[in-house]
């Protein structure tokens, strides 16, 4: 078994782990295999030394559970054309449902499902504005159900928090030691209870000197981040998109169940990881060391992205490339196409190409210093090189 096949199977077996845990595990075993190869093992022998994939996945999952890591529902790879068609249909329905959930006629739908829900009148909603000294605050934790969130730079050295609330107060803000916690305390309050299905709004303004960690989790609503620099970003949304622009971070993880993830004009000193179940991942003008993009039902679009290692995986969707420059590239589409342009020339790459049901314009071979692995089950591959 090749290293690539081993890592692919291990990734599939760890589908119930959060994306950051999965990425760390795959990186660990990738480096472990490389170390054995450097010490004289053949690739097949180095992989064989890792042991049984199912046992490894079981032990890793058990360890994660003991550490309190929250598991997610695994996305089983589609094995037949029938399952692929059903998956696409389900994806379309899920995207449509979540879009309606966030934008249209939610209160009417909820009335039919669970009876009449009292609406919050506009006069019950009021604006709240708070200020906090930056001090030693390096960690910000946000957990919201019915809000759209904007994070941006402030004009002074204070943290400014502005949001809409209701008379009974549904948001708890706690600033102590090095942390600022912002949590919605009434979880059952969601957009079903708002007139015209509108979400509440929250804006967090941070001093430009802030270089800490932001962890944000939204159930519904869009997350918009436009701030100069973080050490770490961990942003997730269930029914809503995520947009990150004009920022720098050491490590960033974006996760959306039903929504688009857009990353534009950003730099990451280590890793950028984005995971979407039903939606689109779009990158423009991005620099990072490790890039890991994964979508189950949706498109991945890459425009002018530079990385050391890039891994892009879609189950039922397409991969579009307008400029990807990396030393190691892995592109995989189970049911969809892979099209676009890569940096360099064909001679720069050592290529491994596999297409089961479809067509491809590139073949395995070459001895370049860059590596390119392309896998497509049912679809076409059309990749060109900028310097050819």
Image (cartoon, rainbow, N blue to C red):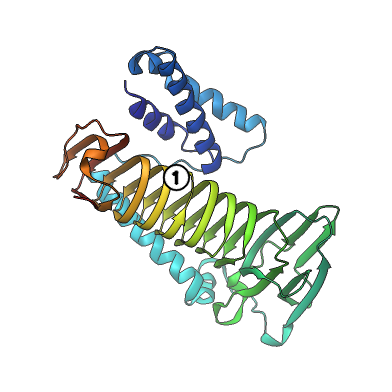
Q: Is residue 177 left or right of residue 228?
A: right
Q: Nearer the viewer, residue 200 or 331?
A: 331
The residue indicated by pointer 1 is 292
Q: Position of residue 54 (x, y in %)?
A: 44, 22
Q: Is residue 87 above or below residue 352?
A: below
Residue visible at 16% across and 37% down? 363
Q: Is residue 320 left or right of residue 204?
A: left
**Can the viewer see residue 3?**
yes
Q: Position of residue 119 (x, y in %)?
A: 64, 79
Q: Position of residue 93 (x, y in %)?
A: 36, 61
SS category of the residue bearing label 1: strand
Q: Is residue 66 left or right of residue 196?
A: right
**Can the viewer see residue 79?**
no
Badge 1: few (under 14), some or many (20 or more) residues near its Cα, within 10 Å? some
- Classify the position of the N terminus by image quarter: top left
Which quarter of the figure has residue 134?
A: bottom right
Q: Is residue 131 above or below residue 95?
A: below
Residue visible at 31% across and 35% down? 371
Which quarter of the figure has residue 170?
A: bottom right
Q: Is residue 325 above or below residue 191?
A: above
Residue visible at 57% across and 61% down? 247
Could you tell me how many numbered marks the image carries?
A: 1
Which quarter of the figure has residue 214?
A: bottom right
From this viewpoint, which residue is outermost toward the bottom? Answer: 123
Q: Is residue 257 left or right of residue 211?
A: left
Residue visible at 64% across and 55% down? 230
Q: Position of residue 137 (x, y in %)?
A: 79, 56
């Amino acid at each position: 078994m090749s290293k690539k096949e081993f890592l692919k199977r291990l990734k599939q077996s760890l589908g119930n782990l959060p994306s950051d845990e999965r990425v760390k595990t795959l990186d660990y075993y990738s480096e472990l295999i490389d170390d054995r190869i450097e010490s004289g093992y053949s690739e097949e022998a180095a992989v064989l030394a890792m042991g049984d994939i199912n046992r490894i996945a079981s032990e890793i999952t058990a360890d994660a559970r003991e550490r309190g890591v929250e598991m997610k529902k695994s996305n089983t790879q589609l094995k037949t054309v029938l399952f692929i068609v059903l998956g696409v249909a389900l994806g379309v329905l899920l995207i449509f449902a979540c879009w309606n959930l966030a934008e249209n006629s939610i209160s009417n739908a909820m009335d039919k499902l669970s009876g009449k829900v009292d609406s919050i009148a506009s006069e019950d909603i009021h604006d709240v504005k708070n200020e906090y000294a930056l001090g030693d605050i390096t960690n910000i934790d946000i957990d919201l159900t019915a809000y759209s969130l904007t994070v941006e730079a402030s004009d002074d050295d204070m943290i400014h928090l502005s949001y809409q609330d209701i008379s009974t107060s549904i948001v708890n803000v706690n600033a102590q030691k090095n942390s600022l916690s912002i949590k919605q305390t009434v979880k059952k309050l969601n957009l079903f209870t708002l007139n015209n299905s509108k979400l509440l709004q929250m804006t967090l303004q941070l001093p430009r000197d802030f270089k800490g960690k932001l962890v944000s989790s939204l159930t519904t609503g869009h997350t918009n981040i436009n701030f100069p620099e973080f050490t770490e970003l961990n942003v997730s949304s269930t029914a809503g998109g995520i947009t990150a622009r004009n920022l720098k971070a050491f490590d960033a993880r974006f996760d959306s169940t039903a929504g688009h993830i857009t990353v534009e004009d950003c730099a990451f000193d280590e890793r950028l990881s984005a995971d979407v179940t039903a939606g689109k991942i779009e990158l423009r003008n991005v620099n990072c060391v490790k890039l890991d993009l994964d979508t189950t039902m949706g498109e991945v679009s890459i425009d002018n992205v530079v990385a050391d290692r890039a891994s892009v995986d879609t189950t039922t969707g397409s991969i579009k490339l307008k400029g990807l420059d990396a030393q190691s590239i892995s592109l995989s589409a189970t049911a969809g196409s892979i099209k676009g342009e890569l940096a360099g020339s064909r001679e720069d790459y050592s290529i491994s190409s596999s297409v089961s049901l479809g067509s491809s314009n590139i073949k395995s071979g070459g001895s370049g210093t860059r590596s390119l692995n392309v896998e497509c089950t049912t679809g076409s591959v059309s990749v060109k090189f900028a310097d050819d």
